[in-house]
Image (cartoon, helix red, strand yellow):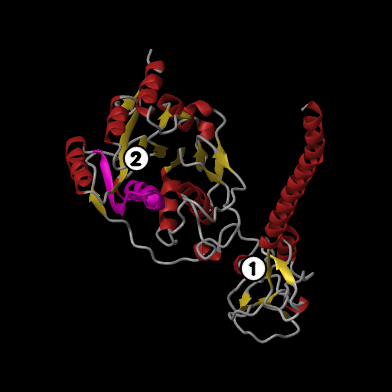
Amino acid sequence: MGEERKRRRRKKGPGRIESLVRNFLAFFGFCFIVFNLFLVSKIKPSSLDDGKAIPHKEKRTPRAFNFEVDIDFHDKSAPRVLKSTTSSTSTTSTTLSSETSSKESEPESEEKKAEVIPGNPLLAQLQKKEGVVQTAQLIDRVRYLIAENPDESIPKRYADNTTVPDLEFMITPEVDCVRKDLVIFVKSRVESSGLREIIRNTWAHTHAIEKWSIATIFLVGKSDSKYLNKNLQNEGRDKQDLLVGDYLDAYQNLTSKSISGLQWFANECTDSRNYLSVDDDVFPDLPLILGFLNKAENSQVELACLYNYVQHARVTRKGKWQTSWESYGKEFYPVYCEGACFSMPRWAAVKLFKNAQVTYRDAPVDDAYLTGVLREKAGLIPKQVQNKRMCKHLVNDDEIIQKLRAEWAQHQP
């Protein structure tokens, strides 16, 4: 019996090894097939005649708009966009086109690419930064930049005069702002009635500090909610310090909100000496501000940036504060005061409003427009105030009321 079992084991031994080898080869073959299928899935047949294959991720020439932009590169004094599509020795035609059919577009020829022209440093600088102009977006950008005079700090459409009607108001304040040393305009949101009440009970509770008289007016827009508009009417009737403009209270209308304060100050606050603009999440130290405004050496300050002095601010082309190239044809805003807190004497505020009456108002960034574009057009010079304690930005969030109360408590004797 023992010998028989040994013979059977010897016979089964090779069979077991063969089975393991066979299973391993089968598993390896399966993996090899799966791997090849994976590679095949990453390649699709080309529609070209030569039958070659191209990877899926290879970018084909996108469909684009057919248009031509003719630019006069040699006229340095007044660069402009030519409407004519005929080329000459003084013009270069930049063409961007593609077929709208299903065929692959031919590679863009060298003649169709924009080339650096020595006579135009603006285009040379742009092309050095961005590369060869190959997209409609860059062509649009170049078109507006070339159309602008590089020696001017604001776009031509803002520098040129137009007719803009004055703003209409739904609710006007009864606050006496005539012959005041300082009139404060607080930009506030329509739904922030609680925050306005805290401001009335803290830093805006007084109508005089020492010998200086003060008036405070809240700037608000209307709401698309009947409930909120009704609350505004009740608040305006009870507090008599609301200036509610006939525009929707939204980010896009902050420029209108700021101009409404200038308009009211210029037309209604006659003989008042100084204009102060603050956001409702700012705590202004009024004794410090009044002391600054009444110093003899500061009497000639045309525009005082009491919070931040902004330089080289790039125009935003996307997001909440986006501005189109058609609206603002330059890459940067002129120097301006950040809108959280700034002041100016009466003559400068009136001059700013006079320029607002003849200037487009479609720039959504209100401080860049008011203290940048309009200031530049009016010829006013801004000044950065070194004392940062005059205006403390508390940031408008869920705790803003507690922050205002705490700041007010710290300023009490």
The alpha-carbon separation of the residues under discs 1 and 2 comes to 42 Å
Disc on res. 135? 1
Circle 2 residue: 188
Q: Nearer the viewer, mark 1 or mark 2?
A: 1
Figure disc tally: 2
Within 10 Å of the Cα at label 2, are there few (<14), some (14-19), or many (20+) other Cα atoms?
A: many
* Residue in the picture at 44% in, 29% down: 394
Chief secondary structure of the magenta portion:
helix
Q: Residue 59 appears at what percent x and percent y?
A: 67, 66
Q: Residue 396 appears at what percent x and percent y?
A: 41, 34
* Residue in the picture at 52% in, 54% down: 318
Lower position in the chain sequence, tag 1 or tag 2: 1
* Residue in the picture at 31% in, 56% down: 167
Classify 244 as above or below 7.
below
Tag 1: residue type?
Thr
- Looking at the picture, tell me which residue is in the foreground, 72 or 143: 143
What span is colored magenta in the figure?
241-267
Q: What element does badge 1 sit on?
A: loop
Classify 167 as above or below 273.
below
Tag 2: residue type?
Ser
Q: Are marks 1 and 2 in contact (CB under 8 Å)?
A: no
In magenta segment, residue 310: no
In magenta segment, residue 262: yes
Q: Locate residue 269: give its quadrant.
A: top left
Q: Is residue 57 visible?
A: no
Quadrant of the drawing holding the N terminus: top right
- Looking at the picture, tell me which residue is in the foreground, 352 or 122: 122
Quadrant of the drawing holding the C terminus: top left
